[in-house]
Amino acid sequence: MKVIKSIFIAAIFVVALFFTAINTHFVDVYYHYERPPLKVPLFLVVLGSVLLGMLIAGIIASLDRFQLKREIRSLRRTIKEQEAELNTLRNLPLETEAEREG
C-alpha cells in the first residue's frame, strides 16, 4: 500500500512540475479596485486557488464532522437512558400483591 501511495504522490508531483513549466507567463491580478494589478505567474494563481478551495472544503468538512460527533454523543446518551429504562421495566413484577391474593 505504501508503494502505491508513493507512486501516486510522485505522479502528482510530476504533473504539478509539468503544469508549472507550461504556465510560467505572468497575469494581472486585481485584488482591490483602487490599486494597480499585481503581476503573478499563472501557476501561482491556479495553485493558490486550489489551496484556498481545499482549505474551505476542509473547514466545512470539519464543521460537519463536529456536528456529527455531537449528534452521536447525544444518541449514545439516549441509548443509555433507554437501556436503563428497559432494565427497570424488566425487573418489575408481572403481577401485584393484590392480584395474587384476590
Image (cartoon, rainbow, N blue to C red):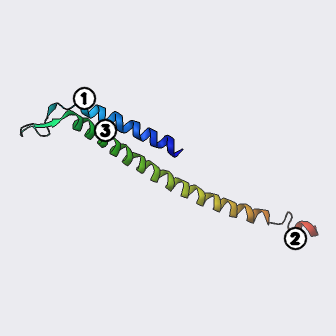
Q: Nearer the viewer, mark 3 or mark 2?
A: 3
Task: Report x, y in % for residue 20.
Answer: 26, 34
According to the image, label 3 marks what residue? 50
Query: What amino acid is found at the position of numbered circle 3 in the picture?
Result: Val
Q: Quadrant of the C terminus?
A: bottom right
Among the two numbered marks 3 and 2 on one chain, the one whose residue lies closer to the N terminus = 3
Quarter occupied by residue 45: top left
Amino acid at circle 1: Ile
The image quadrant where one finds the N terminus is top right
Which numbered disc flags the more N-terminal residue, 2 or 1?
1
* Closest to the observer, 55 or 100: 55
Q: How many marks?
A: 3
- The residue shown at (85%, 67%) is 96
How would you rate the neighbour count of disc 3 (Cα within 10 Å): few for under 14, some for 14-19, many for 20 or more? few
Crowd class of label 1 (few under 14; some 14 to 19; many from 20; radius 10 Å): few
**Residue 48 in the image, given as x and y percentages of width and height:** 26, 40
Residue in front for this viewpoint, 11 or 59: 11
Crowding near pointer 2: few (<14 within 10 Å), some, many (20+)? few
Q: Which residue is mark 2?
A: 97
Estimate the x, y position of residue 26 in percent, counting from the top left. Answer: 15, 32
Q: Residue at x 74, y 66 (%)?
A: 88
Kindly indicate whether the residue at mark 1 contacts the one at mark 3 (C-beta within 8 angstroms).
no
Q: Which secondary structure lies at badge 1?
A: helix
- Displayed quadrant of residue 80: bottom right
Q: CA distance from mark 2 to mark 1?
A: 90 Å
Give the left or right position of residue 48, taking residue 85 as reference.
left
Residue at the spot x=87%, y=70% of the render? 97
Contact between marks 2 and 1 (CB within 8 A): the answer is no
Measure the C-alpha gap from mark 3 to mark 1.
17 Å
Q: Secondary structure at mark 3?
A: helix
Tell me, for residue 22, which label it has, or none.
1
